[in-house]
Image: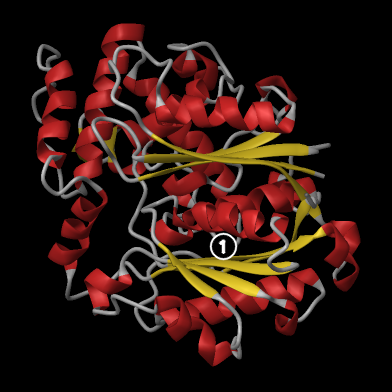
């Protein structure tokens, strides 16, 4: 069983790109990843194309990868289409790694691309989020989570704004965490302020302006206790990864190769939401640590799925970076900031870097690879040698439908 390495990474700037198509975005990230690898596109023996929205928004329901990659000259190789909601491109990485380990090819391409912003399709944009829930049971699942917080008063004047349905789930879980563990809205704002600070040093981030805790608290409420600055934006963008076997390393710039130490993906199981033992993210993290032969104390840097600030708090606990219930004070004390105990979302996270659904996992990997190479500039974590990503996809009965944890090593 060969070791598998990431030898090339590429990403587009994230944001609203009304004049760029899925093909345009894909071409930009793939060309960047190939150039970064020191190899050529002709080296690629299989490809995974990861996308969730093109069918709903543009009617391209099938062969999305073939349509996006053929213009680049990729032909006569297997092209697989992957949709696992927000975890689509991490799922692609997981499958590409297994394909290489099985000896089916030596070099693989994983590309996630999402075109989410359409000026004339705002209603469709928000409705599309429901496709990442159980269409039949999703509303019932959401109500179950909201009922956990039925006795928690919501301050007057905090009516919810325009949002995806996931924000209601995150806000209910945040209120429950506040009730059970004493987490405060100010701690949620501190997480957001940290991420917005980091994003000013990321040239590909959608938002690159620091925002203070007080400014975040004063921002427009999306769904209490979450304000707009605590929630990820609608984003267009693409991220690409080049993976290879140990035998193929000679085709690339070997000195910058990053090894995949663990890649674990799991789906959820019915469980009591007041306990965490069976939380899907916690199970995925435990399995990843076991595969890598490491523990949470060994991580130098992490990119965690923060579609809202509460998402980061939740995943800090699932990744066992702090005790259950302690993520609020842990973050407020600066432990997840640059220079802290475990710098988290150094890219700016989904909150300010952007969240182009199907591309998000690949772009998280891009950040960790950049950190482990020592190439992150002003957001560099000094001496980083081991990093992890946690990437959740969809929602099922109060948590992610799928959780993916990847651990990389220099």
Horizontal and vertical percent for residue 66?
Answer: 46, 82
Residue at (56, 17) in percent of width and height: 333
Viewer-side residue, 61 vs 123: 61
* Above-or-below relation of 328 to 200: above
> Which SS class for mark 1?
loop
**Apparent side of residue 247 relative to residue 7 in the rendered image (left or right):** right
Q: Which residue does the numbered mark 1 point to in the structure image?
A: 204
* Above-or-below relation of 18 to 168: below
Quarter of the image with the C terminus in it: top right
Viewer-side residue, 150 vs 391: 391
* Above-or-below relation of 353 to 222: below
Horizontal and vertical percent for residue 22?
Answer: 41, 78
Residue at (53, 91) in percent of width and height: 71
Residue at (71, 20) in percent of width and height: 297
Horizontal and vertical percent for residue 290?
Answer: 67, 26
Label 1 neighbourhood size at 10 Å, few (<14), some (14-19), many (20+)? some
* Above-or-below relation of 6 to 191: below
Horizontal and vertical percent for residue 106?
Answer: 75, 67
């Amino acid at each position: 069983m060969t070791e598998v390495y990431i030898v090339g990474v590429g990403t587009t700037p994230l944001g609203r790109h009304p004049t760029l198509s899925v093909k345009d975005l894909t071409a930009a990230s793939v060309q960047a990843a190939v150039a970064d690898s020191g190899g050529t596109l002709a080296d690629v023996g299989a490809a995974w194309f990861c996308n969730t929205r093109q069918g709903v928004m543009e009617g391209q329901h099938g062969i999305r990868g073939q349509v996006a990659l053929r213009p680049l000259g990729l032909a006569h190789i297997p092209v697989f289409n992957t949709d696992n909601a927000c975890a689509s491109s991490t799922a692609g990485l997981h499958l590409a790694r297994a394909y290489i380990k099985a000896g089916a090819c030596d070099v693989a391409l994983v590309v996630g691309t999402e075109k989410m912003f359409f000026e004339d399709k705002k209603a469709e944009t928000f409705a599309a989020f429901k496709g990442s829930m159980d269409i039949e049971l999703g509303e019932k699942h959401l109500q179950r989570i909201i009922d956990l917080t039925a006795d928690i008063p919501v301050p007057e004047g905090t009516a919810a704004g325009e949002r995806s349905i996931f924000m209601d789930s995150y806000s209910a879980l945040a209120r429950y965490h506040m009730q059970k563990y004493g987490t405060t809205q100010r701690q949620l704002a501190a997480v957001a302020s940290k991420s917005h600070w980091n994003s000013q040093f990321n040239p590909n981030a959608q938002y690159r302006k620091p925002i203070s805790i007080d400014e975040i608290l004063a921002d427009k409420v999306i769904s209490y206790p979450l304000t707009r600055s605590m929630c990820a934006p609608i984003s267009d963008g693409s991220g690409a990864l080049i993976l290879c076997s140990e035998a193929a390393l000679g085709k690339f710039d070997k000195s910058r190769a990053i090894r995949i130490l663990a890649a674990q993906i799991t789906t959820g199981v019915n469980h009591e939401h007041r306990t965490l033992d069976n939380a899907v993210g916690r199970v995925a993290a435990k399995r990843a640590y076991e595969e890598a032969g490491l523990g949470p104390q060994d991580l130098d840097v992490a990119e965690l799925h923060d579609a809202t600030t509460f998402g980061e708090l939740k995943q800090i606990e699932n990744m066992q970076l702090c005790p259950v219930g302690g993520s609020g004070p842990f973050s407020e004390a600066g432990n997840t900031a640059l220079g802290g105990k475990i710098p988290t979302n150094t890219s700016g996270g989904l909150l300010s870097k952007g969240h182009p659904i199907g591309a998000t996992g690949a772009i998280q990997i891009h950040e960790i690879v950049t950190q482990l190479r020592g190439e992150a500039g002003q957001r560099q974590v000094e001496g980083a040698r081991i990093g992890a990503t946690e990437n959740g996809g969809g929602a099922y009965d109060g948590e992610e439908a799928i959780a993916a944890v990847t651990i990389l090593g220099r």
